[in-house]
């Protein structure tokens, strides 16, 4: 098992759209939490060298230097492969020379920075606390230490126009960053936006924005390698690719998910339970059929699709035997190219409609 | 009963002018029923008739009445009030010598008053004009009198004033019936000639016909022959309704009653046909017979495809009572197995559809109604089609003719402009406007029947706030520049949505249909083009974009279980869709497209 995710649930402020496991930063809790995290990790015996480690949140970067030192101490238990990828998620306002130095010292070699938008009104709307100038400065500083950077961008924010989005994209391009994740805003229950009964933007606009993003980034040398992810050559997120390749991984921390052999588990989101050592909230043992289903609906998120031969090798079954893909291939929603089964780019915006053909009873 | 003491008459009226109430009152006055026995509107026995306030099927009632110490036998023959059934109306009128023309004291003459009056005059009936509802607060007896005098040429002393509801003027009316309506002519010693003016089915006795004996007489046990259908039967039972059934040994010249002859096939009994004795060597048909031909056609499909057999049963049962209903199996790629059905008109169609849904509990999808087109092919042969699906290739067609009607639209004169606009938009050709008085007009247009069956009634209502009354007569076929318009979903034509339209109207109609479809088909689809086409030419196009939030769901922290749940939920929703071509459409959307209104 070469892939590890660690969740740091604390945040200085809560974004209006966020429904991930998060808590207001509270000094007293942080150390207790880190201690519990250490215990959870120690329940596993991990001898293999890691290919990737991903510290997400929440906002891992909101920990102070001492707390970060504690965190990195815990992480020392892991050994890395030579070409490892070690990502930590950061907020713009947390990026300081001191923290960057600490990251670098502790082998962090990839940053994922949440920017979401450069538009000041929209930043406020999302209840975030950076501005364009800070962002530019912070990125420039970060690049001095770590050159593999991802930026998260959100689009289809209420009141956002296509022009706003183009502005965001242009500003993003100027930063000369090698990876970008873009997500259409989802209004999830238990978020401020949901509670204030926010409406989605018009479907047509959402679609237009998606097209606009794809066009713009591809024209500027980015490879659209997953539904929502774009990269310069050789900067794909290895950690995320492992998810999409239906690979195994550990998930540690509050609300984290893991996938070990055929078992998927999700940790509790209740910090008191977690600190008490009751880590796991629910788990599922996947049948072979379910594993194959997930191989498909995760794999087809990649533009490269699912490797037909690898699938066969992994499950001793041909994709065709397991799933009825004839209609999808005939209607050109799926295409087969170089032994890969992939979603036709024309239909990528509607991928869910294709993916649902790979779940549930095959007789349906 | 002496022949000269028989009076046969009908009541004709526009909807809601009080025909049925007047009939009830006559029944009461003649002692046929007591008030206690009286159901509201006794003669209208079907639930739908009552709800719609119209009479669809006919009944004849025999009444006894004493006047000036003479006994009289009256036969009240009920008529359907709607243009769809005008042939049936004309046959019941043909079995009478007189008709009571009822006009509402507040409404005045309306379209059907006139249409039915003309039918009565065609049959040389003596007309007794009656102004009904004279005690209503908004009654304007003088104005309606003037209309009857000016427009229809009646004189003051001919007009009887009644309030059927409150029993006013009923005796006067009965007196007028006896004094003015002539006794039946005809000779009891001649060969039997009886007119069939209605038939209905009853499980155990088979088909029962309503007849008027015009000459001669018919007895139980007689061998009879239907002249048009050549069917021969033995008379099993004769009788009259009083309104209860009362058996008789014979029916003689001038009388009206029912005849049972163990008739099992409705095809043998045609309204308007003549019955004579089989022994009659030189039978002569009564004038006016014509086979009834459906004018309006549509496909009828069960919403639940496993109800096809039930639908077949339902149609067969309805057919027993309704010779004018035609149906044959039809399949549609979009809608599955169903029937192509022919109707006398739109109302007839609606009634049948409603009865299937209500009495047989089968939910239906009906395709847009079509008329019969006459098509001349390049080899100069003619074919007729009743469905857009049957339209031959454009290259094989020289000419298409379609049925036209002539309208009577009665409307307050301030609506002349709206009506003209409406008729023009329905490809109407202006004929004339008649002024009934200074405030009301009768507008005549010639309009293709296909436009009438489309949405004319609804439009008329909304254009005139319900003030217009409308009737029409068929005037024959005329050439029109017609084309078949297909609707394509995802580049595949949906057979059930094809229509035949005038070329000049195709663009507009095509655009409206695709726009409406776009609104109706939910966005959880792939991007789906909706197109209207004439042949290979696309004349309108819309695209149903994909639903948003269909990609996303970031796998933060590798929470795959959540992603799976989301997909499962979406899959659940998809199961509720119906595949039409290769596009999934919710059933309701399909229904509303077919019953779509032009906005």
Image (cartoon, rainbow, N blue to C red):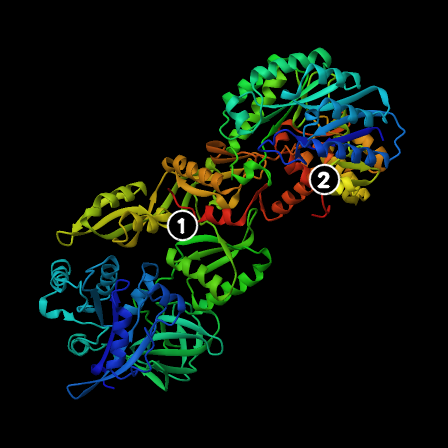
Q: Name the image quarter holding residue B221.
A: bottom left
Q: Nearer the viewer, residue A86 or B290?
A: A86
| Distance from Cα at disc 2 to Cα at disc 1 | 73 Å
Of all residues, the one furthest to the bottom in this rendering is B69
Q: Which is more toward the observer, A33 or B454?
A: A33
Please tell me which residue is depicted at 44% across the width and 78% down the height of the picture: B261
Q: Which mark is residue A271?
A: 2
The answer to whether residue A233 shows anywhere in this view is no
What element does badge 2 sit on? helix
Mark 1 chain: B
Residue appearing at x 40%, y 57% in the figure: B294
Q: Which mark is residue B312?
A: none
Residue A145 x, y percent position in the rendering = 73, 13
Q: Closer to the camera, B543 or A229?
A: A229
Badge nearest the viewer, 2 or 1: 2
Subunit under mark 2:
A
Residue A352 appears left or right of B72: right
| Secondary-structure class at tag 1 | loop
Check the image and report above or below for B15 versus A238.
Answer: below
Give above or below for B532 relative to B75: above
> In the rendered image, which quarter contains the C terminus of chain B?
top left
In the rendering, which numbered label is found on residue B371? 1
Outermost front residue: A28
Residue appearing at x 66%, y 37% in the figure = A354
Q: Residue B597 or B110: which is nearer the viewer?
A: B597
Identify the image quadrant of the N terminus of chain B.
bottom left
Residue B434, percent from left and from top: 17, 50
């Amino acid at each position: 098992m070469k892939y590890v995710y660690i969740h740091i649930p604390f945040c200085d402020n809560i974004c209006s759209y966020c429904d991930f496991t998060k808590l207001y930063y509270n000094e007293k809790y942080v150390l207790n939490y880190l201690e519990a995290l250490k215990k959870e990790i120690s329940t596993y015996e991990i001898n293999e060298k890691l290919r990737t480690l991903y510290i997400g949140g929440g906002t891992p970067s909101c920990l102070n230097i001492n707390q970060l030192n504690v965190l990195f101490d815990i992480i020392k238990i892991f050994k890395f492969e030579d070409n490892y990828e070690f990502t930590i998620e950061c907020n713009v306002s947390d990026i300081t020379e001191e923290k960057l130095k600490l990251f670098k010292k502790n082998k962090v070699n990839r940053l994922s920075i949440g920017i979401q938008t450069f538009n000041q009104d929209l930043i406020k709307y999302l209840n975030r606390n950076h501005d364009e100038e800070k962002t530019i400065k912070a990125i420039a500083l970060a690049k001095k230490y770590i050159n593999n950077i991802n930026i998260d961008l959100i689009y289809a924010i209420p009141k956002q126009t296509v022009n706003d989005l183009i502005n965001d994209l242009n500003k993003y391009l100027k930063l000369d960053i090698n990876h970008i994740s873009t997500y259409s805003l989802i209004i999830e229950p238990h978020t401020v936006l949901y509670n204030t009964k926010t409406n989605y933007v018009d479907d047509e606009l959402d679609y237009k924005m998606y097209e606009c993003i794809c066009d713009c980034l591809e024209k500027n040398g980015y490879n659209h390698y997953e539904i929502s992810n774009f990269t310069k050559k050789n900067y794909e997120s290895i950690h995320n690719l492992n998810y999409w390749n239906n690979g195994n991984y550990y998930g540690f921390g509050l609300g984290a998910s893991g996938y070990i052999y055929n078992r998927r588990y999700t940790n509790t989101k209740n910090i008191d339970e977690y600190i008490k050592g009751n880590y796991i909230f629910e788990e599922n043992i996947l049948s072979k059929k379910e594993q194959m289903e997930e191989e498909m609906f995760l794999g087809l998120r990649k533009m490269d699709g699912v490797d037909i031969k690898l699938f066969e090798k992994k499950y001793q079954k041909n994709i065709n035997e397991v799933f009825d893909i004839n209609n999808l291939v005939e209607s050109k929603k799926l295409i087969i190219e170089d032994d890969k089964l992939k979603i036709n780019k024309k239909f990528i915006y509607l991928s869910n409609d294709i993916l649902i053909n790979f779940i549930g009873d095959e007789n349906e | 009963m002496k022949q000269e003491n028989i009076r046969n008459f009908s009541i004709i009226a526009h909807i809601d002018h009080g025909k049925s109430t007047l009939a009830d009152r006559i029944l009461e006055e003649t002692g046929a029923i007591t008030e206690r026995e009286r159901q509201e509107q006794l003669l209208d026995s079907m639930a739908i008739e009552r709800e719609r306030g119209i009479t669809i099927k006919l009944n004849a009632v025999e009444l006894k009445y004493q006047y000036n110490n003479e006994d009289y036998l009256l036969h009240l023959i009920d008529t359907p009030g709607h243009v769809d059934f005008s042939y049936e109306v004309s046959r019941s009128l043909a079995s009478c010598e007189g008709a009571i023309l009822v006009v509402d004291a507040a409404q005045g003459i309306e379209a059907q008053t006139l249409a039915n009056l003309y039918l009565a005059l065609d049959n040389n009936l003596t007309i007794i004009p009656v102004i009904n509802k004279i005690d209503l607060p908004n009654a304007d007896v003088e104005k309606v009198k003037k209309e009857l005098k000016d427009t229809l040429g009646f004189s003051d002393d001919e007009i009887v004033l009644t309030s059927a509801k409150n029993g006013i003027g009923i005796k006067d009316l009965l007196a007028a019936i006896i004094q003015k309506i002539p006794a039946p002519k005809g000779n009891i010693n001649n060969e039997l000639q009886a007119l069939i003016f209605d038939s209905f089915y009853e499980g155990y006795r088979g088909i029962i016909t309503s007849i008027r004996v015009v000459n001669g007489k018919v007895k139980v046990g007689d061998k009879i022959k239907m002249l048009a259908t050549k069917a021969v039967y033995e008379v099993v039972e004769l009788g009259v309704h009083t309104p209860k059934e009362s058996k008789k040994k014979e029916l003689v010249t001038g009388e009206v009653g029912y005849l049972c002859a163990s008739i099992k096939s409705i095809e043998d009994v045609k309204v308007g046909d003549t019955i004579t004795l089989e022994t009659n060597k030189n039978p002569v048909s009564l004038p006016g017979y014509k086979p009834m031909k459906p004018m309006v056609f549509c496909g009828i499909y069960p919403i639940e495809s496993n109800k096809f057999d039930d639908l077949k049963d339902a149609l067969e049962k309805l057919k027993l009572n309704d010779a004018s209903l035609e149906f044959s199996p039809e399949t549609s790629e979009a809608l599955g197995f169903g029937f192509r059905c022919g109707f006398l008109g739109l109302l007839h169609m609606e009634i049948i559809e409603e009865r299937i849904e209500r009495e047989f509990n089968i939910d239906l999808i009906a395709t847009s109604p079509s008329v019969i087109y006459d098509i001349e092919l390049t080899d100069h042969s003619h074919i007729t089609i009743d469905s857009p699906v049957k339209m031959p290739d454009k290259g094989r067609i020289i000419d298409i003719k379609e049925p036209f009607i002539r309208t009577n639209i009665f409307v307050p004169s301030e609506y002349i402009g709206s009506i003209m606009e409406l008729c023009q938009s329905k490809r109407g050709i202006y004929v004339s406007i008649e002024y009934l008085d200074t405030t009301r007009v009768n507008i005549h247009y010639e309009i293709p029947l296909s436009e009438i069956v489309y949405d004319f009634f609804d439009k008329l209502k909304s254009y005139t706030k319900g003030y217009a009354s409308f009737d029409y007569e068929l005037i024959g076929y005329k050439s029109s520049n017609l084309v078949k318009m297909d609707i394509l979903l995802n580049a595949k034509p949906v057979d059930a949505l094809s229509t035949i339209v005038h070329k000049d109207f195709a663009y507009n109609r095509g655009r409206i249909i695709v726009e409406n479809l776009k609104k109706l088909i939910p966005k959880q689809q792939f991007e789906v083009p909706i197109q209207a086409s004439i042949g290979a030419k696309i004349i309108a196009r819309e695209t149903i974009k994909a639903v948003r939030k269909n990609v996303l769901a970031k796998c933060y922290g590798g929470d795959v279980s959540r992603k799976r749940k989301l997909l499962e939920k979406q899959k659940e929703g998809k199961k509720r869709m119906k595949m039409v071509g290769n596009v999934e459409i919710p059933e309701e959307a399909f229904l509303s497209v077919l019953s779509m209104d032009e906005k």
